[in-house]
Image (tube, rainbow, N blue to C red):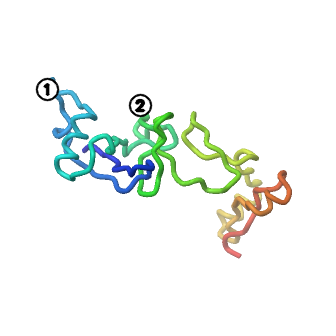
Amino acid sequence: MAHFAKISETNKVLRVSVINNSDILNAEGVEDESVGQVYLEQHSNWPAQMWIQTSYNTWAAQHTLGGTPFRGNYATIGDTWDVINQIFWAPQPHASWAKNNATASWVSPLGSEPSLTTEQNQQNLDGTHGWKYNWDESAYQVDNIIGWVLVDGLA
């Protein structure tokens, strides 16, 4: 199955449609995005150039089945199509986070969340706690060395 994102004039993903692979084959029998775009225009009355192919198996610039990643992320409703970088972006999770084109993901200004200690991991396994780190944008805006906050999800 082939997946195509229907995008608006502002490059927002409005929906994702699934069509048969046979509907995107060119005269030589090779998959061709432009053939799929024309097919979708004929069947949806939406301009061909506003249908962008997306890969169901791509997330954070990785192909989940070991294949070649395609356009950074699988498109979902509300995402934005980045024409220049050829990436589908989820909405920005926090005002301070920036795009990382290499990983097609948003990153905090402080990097990855801290690791839990061995004791915290054991408490999670035991079911006595649910330790995790959440991003606190307000804390970061007050003091830009604070952002990741340890919380107990079971508390």
Closest to the observer: 74 or 8?
A: 8
In space, the residues marked 2 and 1 are separated at their CA atoms by: 24 Å
Q: For numbered disc 1, what is the local secondary structure?
A: loop
Q: Residue at x 61, y 42 (%)?
A: 99
Instruction: Please state if 53 lies on the left or on the right of 40 as rendered.
Output: right
Three-letter amino acid code of the residue under disc 1 = Ala
Residue 65 place in picture, x, y as percent: 40, 38
Q: Residue at x 33, y 50 (%)?
A: 6
Above or below residue 143? Residue 61 is above
Q: Residues within 10 Å of mark 2 (few under 14, many from 20)?
A: few
Residue 47 visible in the displayed image: yes
Closest to the observer: 61 or 14?
A: 14
Farthest residue in the left direction?
27
Q: How many marks?
A: 2
Above or below residue 122? Residue 33 is above
What is the number of the mark on residue 35?
none
Q: For numbered disc 2, what is the local secondary structure?
A: loop
Residue 68 place in picture, x, y as percent: 41, 31
Q: Residue at x 42, y 54 (%)?
A: 76
Question: Where is mark 1, residue-wise?
Answer: 27
Q: In the rendered structure, are the residues bearing label 2 and label 1 in contact, judged by CB atoms less than 8 Å apart?
A: no
Q: Residue at x 61, y 39 (%)?
A: 100
Residue 133 visible in the displayed image: no
Question: Where is mark 2, residue-wise?
Answer: 68
Q: Residues within 10 Å of mark 1 (few under 14, many from 20)?
A: few
Instruction: Please state if 49 lies on the left or on the right of 44 as rendered.
Output: right
Residue 134 place in picture, x, y as percent: 70, 61
Above or below residue 126? Residue 57 is above
The quarter of the displayed image where residue 94 is located: bottom right
Looking at marks 2 and 1 on the same chain, the residue that comes earlier in the sequence is marked by: 1
Three-letter amino acid code of the residue under disc 2 = Thr
Farthest residue in the front direction?
9
